Amino acid sequence: MDFQSLVEQYKSRSSSALVDSIAAGLSYADELSVDVGLLSDTGVLDDVLGAVSVALPFAIIAVTEGGKAVLGHKTGRAAVQDAGYRVIKTGAAMGAGAAAAGLGAGFLPAIPVTMGVRMALDR
């Protein structure tokens, strides 16, 4: 592996880390909208947004890694392995955000904690 391929690999990892961090942070947007009063805590819309927001980061990972495998940028095995690592890091970050929200401060601190933990796990 030469230097140029290492640089390209690093660039692709840093952009996926940013996308994963934003998606993980957005997973708490529906709960935050309930906390600030933009959305009521009852109704079908809240249930749908809750399910979609939790699944969103994992769907983004599956689509991006699957797309790289389909387009031939990665082998299928490498895409599955990279997706697994990204899912584990994103799940851990979302767990840290849930713990921050569970401390009683609401969901506002969950977003920066989730994004910060996700970025820290890639460093």
Image (cartoon, rainbow, N blue to C red):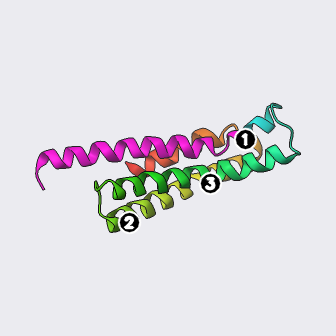
What is the secondary structure assignment of the residue under circle 3?
A: helix
| Left/right of residue 16 with respect to residue 33 in the rendered view | left
Q: Per the image, is 25 magenta?
A: yes
Q: Earlier in the sequence, mark 3 or mark 2?
A: 3
Q: Amino acid at mark 2?
A: Gln
**Numbered tag placed on residue 19 in the rendering:** none
Whether the residues at callouts 3 and 2 have beta carbons within 8 Å, the answer is no
User: Where does label 2 land, which residue?
Assistant: 81
Instruction: Give the magenta-colored segment's residue range.
Output: 1-30
Q: Residue at x 29, y 42 (%)?
A: 11
**For the view shown, which residue lies furthest in the bottom direction?**
77
- The residue where tag 3 is placed is 55
The disc, 1 or 2, on the residue closer to the chain's N-terminal end is 1
Residue 19 at what x, y percent from top left?
Answer: 47, 42
Query: In x, y percent, where is residue 60?
Result: 51, 50
- Residue linked to disc 1: 30
